[in-house]
Image: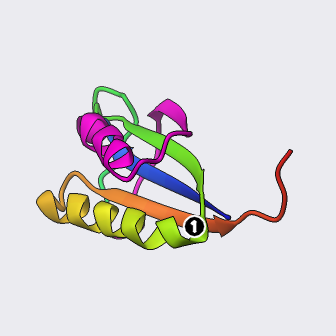
Amino acid sequence: MKSVMIVFNQANTERVEYMLDMLNIKGFTFFEDVQGRGTNGGEPRRGTHAWPEMNSCVITIVEDHQVEALLDGVRKLDMRNKEVGVRAFVWNIEATV
């Protein structure tokens, strides 16, 4: 099993949820108002006057065979608008309770 964390501009919230639905990924945890800045020249997302946009984050646990399709969906979403930005990170899950 793998954990996939997707960090995205809040403008992409509906697209990310739609992607999870289309991939039949039912379980996830959603975080709103996530602050940060991308490592590849990304603009800060701070919810301030100077940097008003904000990010959100979704963490899901999926079977190994689902990871590539999910990452492919994230790549396609990122290609729609590079300025908005979306990133995914994958971790191994050793155990769950």
Residue 75 picture quarter: bottom left
From the image, tell me which residue sits under label 1.
90
Residue 13 picture quarter: top left
Q: In terms of depth relative to the viewer, which is nearer, 90 or 20?
A: 20
Q: Is residue 93 above or below residue 16?
A: below
Q: Is residue 9 above or below residue 30?
A: below
Quadrant position of the C terminus in the picture:
top right
Is 19 colored magenta in this rendering? yes
x, y percentage for residue 2? 64, 64
Query: Relative to residue 35, is residue 3 drawn left or right?
Result: right
Q: Is residue 3 above or below residue 52?
A: below
Q: Residue at x 36, y 35 (%)?
A: 54
Q: Residue at x 13, y 59 (%)?
A: 80
Question: Which scheme is used to colour this image of the protein?
Answer: rainbow
Q: Is residue 41 visible?
A: no
Q: Is residue 75 visible?
A: yes
- Amino acid identity at mark 1: Val
x, y percentage for residue 87? 40, 60
Q: Residue at x 52, y 64 (%)?
A: 89
